[in-house]
Amino acid sequence: MAKILGLDLGTNSIGWALIDDKLNKIIGIGSRIFPMGVENLGDGDNEMSKNASRTSARGVRRQFFRRRLRKKILLKALSENKMCPMDTTDFEDWKKTKLFPTDKLATWFALNPYVLRQKALNEKLSLEEIGRVFYHLIQRRGFLSNSRKGGSDDGAIFKGNAKEGKIGIDDTLESIEGKTLGSYLYEISPKENQPFQDGLERIRNRYTTRKMYVDEFELIWEKQAQFYPVLNHDLKTKFGGRKQDDYKEDGILFHQRPLRSQKHLVGNCSFEPTKTKCPISAIPVEMFRIWQWVNTVEYNGKKLTQEEKDKIIEQLLSFDKIEFKKLRKTIGKESAEFKFNYKDDDKIVGTHTVSNLSNKKFFGKKWFEFSEKGQEDIWHVLYFFDSKSNLKEYAIKNWNFTEEQAIAISRFNVKDGYASLSRKAIGNVLPFLQQGYTYDVAVVMGGIKNTFGDKWQNDTLENNQKQLDLIDNVEGIIRSKITGGFIDTIKDLLRKEFQFDDKQLKKLYHHSATIDVAALLEKLPVGKEADKDIQAIRNPIVITALFELRKLVNVLIEEPRTT
């Protein structure tokens, strides 16, 4: 008896019907209702996972914990250098009782930090007063992105938020020109024994940058070191060092925890399962994409000539996006007699990385004179450098950029995201795309190249010719519509001509090449491993629906009737 299960998957329900197609009879019918995977479904930005609030609260707890830990580490360092009223016994008592020694630090905390930050630039402070300044700096350290892409110069953090009364970084930078942040905040702060005046600019409720605090720390240390020999370079590194500014380590005040690596979230290549997908901004990916597209272009039922393809590729290397009619003009096929398979107003995706780097504002036409390794090294720097200032310095030193060029390239960001294939697979397929083969044919040819490994076109003269003869026959085999598919025919040829074993044949690129024959399952698998496959989708609505679907199918297998 043949049974067919029909399913209607919704966001919080599954409708099902089980029928016997021979008897034309409904065996069972029903629906399964379950809680929705998200809250506020369809409500735009208000739509969120049910775990989002828990995740957000955990993030806030971590932030508070790390801030407390920084303060504690700073207090201990200050006490060791007689820069705060605490001593070793106070820390031991704090550890035992879990009670912060508020009474002992009350007078120290009562010192006005804005007054001290202003005085520290011009006159001698006591060591404890210097410590109070440092404690104030660590409480509010300013914005510092862990990524070169973070904090767009035109975002709210730079422009401010008028509705909330928040002052942006741009306005604060303009106000503190020629002075430090601390001295400016001292100027606008309400003075002792003077009434508050409505309309005065607030000290807080503003966005600041880490650099403002770093610059102030450097000036304060430079002045106070004139009065205290103990304030040497080693102690300065301990309190305010920054590796990116050539200190041997990050100091307590400005240490920034690096972002956790997200490499484990990158998917694997569909042709090379052990290799991760290649970043979409990589130069081989951009070349792969434009050659894949140009091989699909036809007019009057004919493919482009190699010369016409080369002219279009040259245009695509110069533009991020370009209208198709401009590409027609490039090859002199503007006349209406040429019927293309693309519309004139179609926007064709070119190259983001190459078109920008080969622009005259950066490397210009010199870019195309670089070797593949040279181009790859430049991309590698742009992809992995996190600091704008470091990238700027690197460009001036290593690429002979002007100050203006270096600033511009430090603000240039390559695209985020990943291609569907790995570098290795792209490297195998791209040469055949460049020879004019369409993607489906080039993929199979790239797989054949992969099976030979280092011996591809690097064997005996006879074998090298046999490899080329095989490649010449591949397109005909693919287009022959062999019953059961063409991959088995190619495998048989490789076994016969080159004595390949099954291990080598597994290296072929084809959607069915890695499919293993397995026994028919009695039920859908459950358990940790099966759960991982579902959770890898990373969509709370789909995950919830798939878990419920698995439950439903397994129940129907056990007892195929209405539930």
Image (cartoon, rainbow, N blue to C red):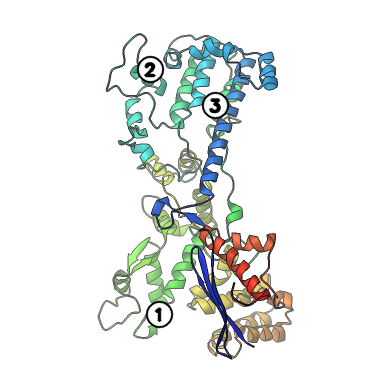
Distance between the Cα atoms at labels 1 and 2? 72 Å
Circle number at residue 186:
2
Please state the horizontal and vertical placement of residue 105, each as a whole percent of the image: 56, 13
Residue at 58% x, 50% y: name it. Answer: 262
* Residue 253, label in figure: 3
Task: Point out residue 323 in the picture as x, y percentages from the top left corner.
Answer: 31, 67
Quadrant the C terminus occupies? bottom right
Disc 1 crowd rating (10 Å Cα; few below 14, some 14-19, many 20+) is few
Query: Identity of the amino acid at label 1?
Result: Thr
Residue 515, can we see it?
Answer: no
User: Marks 1 and 3, Cα distance to the nearest angstrom?
Assistant: 63 Å
User: Dots 3 and 2: beta carbons under 8 Å?
Assistant: no
Q: Is residue 118 left or right of residue 563?
A: left
Instruction: Please give left or right for residue 317 compared with residue 255 in the image.
Output: left
Q: Nearer the viewer, residue 171 or 88?
A: 88
Picture disc at residue 305 = 1
Mark 3, other Cα within 10 Å: few <14 / some 14–19 / many ≥20: many
- 84 or 241: nearer the eye? 84
